[in-house]
Image (cartoon, rainbow, N blue to C red):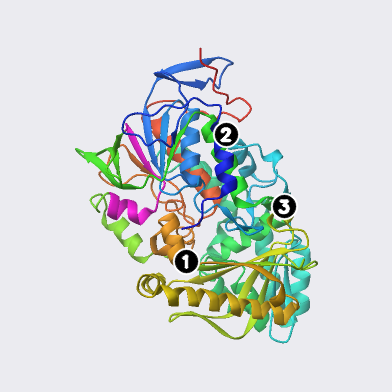
Amino acid sequence: MLPINSQLTSHILNLTSNIPLVSTKKESSNLLTPVINQKLFYYDFWGPNYKAMENKHVIIIGGGMGGLSAGTYLRMNGYDTTIFEMSGNPGGLCTSWERKNYKVDLCIHWLVGSGKGSSFYERWNELIRMEEIRFVNHDEYFRMEDQQGKYISVFTNLDLLESEFLLKAPEDEKEIRKFIKAVRKFLSLDLIPGKSDDIANLWEKMKVGWKLLPYLPCFASYIKYSCRDYSKKFKNPLLRKTIEYLFDPEMSIVFSMMAITWFHKKTAGYPIGGSLNFALKVYDRYIESGGAINFGAKVVKILTENNKAIGVELENGETHFAEYIISAADGHATIFEMLGGMYTNEKLLEFYKTAKTFPSLVFVALGIRKDFAGLPRSVFLPAAKPIYLDPETKLSEVGFYIHNFDKTLAPAGSTLITCMLETRNYDYWNKLHRDDPAQYESEKKRIAGELIEILDKRYGGAKENVEMIDVATPVTFKNSSGNWKGSFEGWLLTPETGFRRLSHTLPGLDNFYMCGQWVAIGGGLPGVLSSGRDTAEIICHKDKILFKVISPEKAKVPEMA
């Protein structure tokens, strides 16, 4: 499992040291919940007074970003919430951990909504104070190199990007200009989701459709292509490879085009301090709002009665009950294990059978006593010979994320470098881990060694200065997150899925909702944030409560007499 961070443990203890704790007989001793007597207090959005209302209790499965988002918005609206999180960390895979003198960062490479030019900036500000976070906006997104040392830079400024593509691949001028023109079309699109389809009325759906209308021809022209498929339109082999890896090769090229617009507008920066620091800000908001969380508490079953969700059963046999149950956990485990596959239909079964998840990873982190100054945030380097990951996966090039822009991740003069090596062969790694642990460890060392050789050959001074090596496999991702097939996110946004969102409810089951990356197609923290928010709004709608959003400045739990 991904390790419990000592910095995180200290942070949680400091955060909760002055809060009186209470636990019921069946609750574990690490359930952190402020004493708020028998009534739940919340800030009245429409005035300066606190109100009291009778508790309605919501249990949330999973303390990742989706669960924390849903819990915080529910607290804003007067619901009592308890999160059951299987690991020892909040934030799910939005995390970092310590290895020797390095902080290994896993998740955020760029965050949509980091700048004021995006509506998602205001969404994030509903949860946390974005002005307190320092973001880095890179001039160069990544660089693709070939065996001869030639390279193409993917600049985040559209004018520079167009000039670079034309300079390095003049034979593709026509398609380059067509591509850049299409990307510019999306510059004026500010994608902020409206109400969830679960509760939106016809007029609200029409307003969203009307806003998208000017962009539909562009969507129609490109949504049918994955990055890999679209790359085949280019003659230049290096540009073809560059386009293929604008994002995930299987992901829709439209997503990559929109990402370029976010970079250009400086609304997709990297938060200094890394993923865990960002996740802790959302966690802090949830705890400060009076939400409860129980770490090391794995839910194995969702309890139902007369087709209503009524509670959960934990791995240790404890049962807990509430008016509503939300799963922000793995979608496949929720539907087919916790609920035993009892609440599905043909459409949902077909989607889980045919839709593509994000792949899993062999994730390699290297701490090197070298500053790697002047290099972009990411460089794709060719391998002299293909790197063998498993019987189905061989890599001819590797993306190195060079974290020289965040000095909090490494000692002075040193650099954290990470590699996300994609594979869809979870079964191979799981079998190896189970049946031959020694060979499992040997394979991890071999892969890390081959990556170090590539770095050393290209830049020199790497091999003899390696101070830290850490390798996670698909088994690590499955064990730490519970994600189906060890996926590092949920559903890929492909030409087949488009930009649709899955329902937050399951057919035939009342008082139950899903949120997180297994509802928000395309992955990413903004989609997870919106999914959690939507779920809270859906529950308010069912209870005929006006959904309210309370800024962090106003959201203070009153002192109790």
Q: Count residues near mark 3 (Cα–Cα under 10 Å), then give few for <14, some for 14-19, many for 20+.
A: many
Q: Are marks 1 and 3 in contact (CB under 8 Å)?
A: no
Magenta region, residue range: 322-338
**Mark-to-mark CA distance, 2 and 3:** 33 Å
Residue lying at 47% horizontally and 47% vertically, measured from the top left: 88
**Element under disc 2:** helix
Gap in Å between the C-alphas at discs 1 and 3? 29 Å
- Give the amino acid type for the residue marked by disc 3 in the picture: Lys
- Which residue corresponds to mark 3? 266
Q: Residue furthest right?
A: 374
The dot on residue 186 is: none
127 to 107, vertically: above or below? above
Residue, disc 2: 15
* Residue of label 1: 360
Counting residues from the start of the chain, the first of labels 2 and 1 encountered is: 2
What residue do we see at 48% from left, 30% from top?
75
Amino acid type of the residue tagged 2 in the rendering: Leu
- Above/below status of 1 relative to 299: below
Earlier in the chain: of badge 1 and badge 3, it is 3
Q: Quadrant of residue 336?
A: bottom left
- Is label 2 in contact with label 1 (beta carbons under 8 Å)? no
Would you say residue 397 is visible in this rendering?
no
Asked if the stretch drawn in magenta spans residue 260, the answer is no
Residue 226 locus on image (x, y percent)? 52, 70
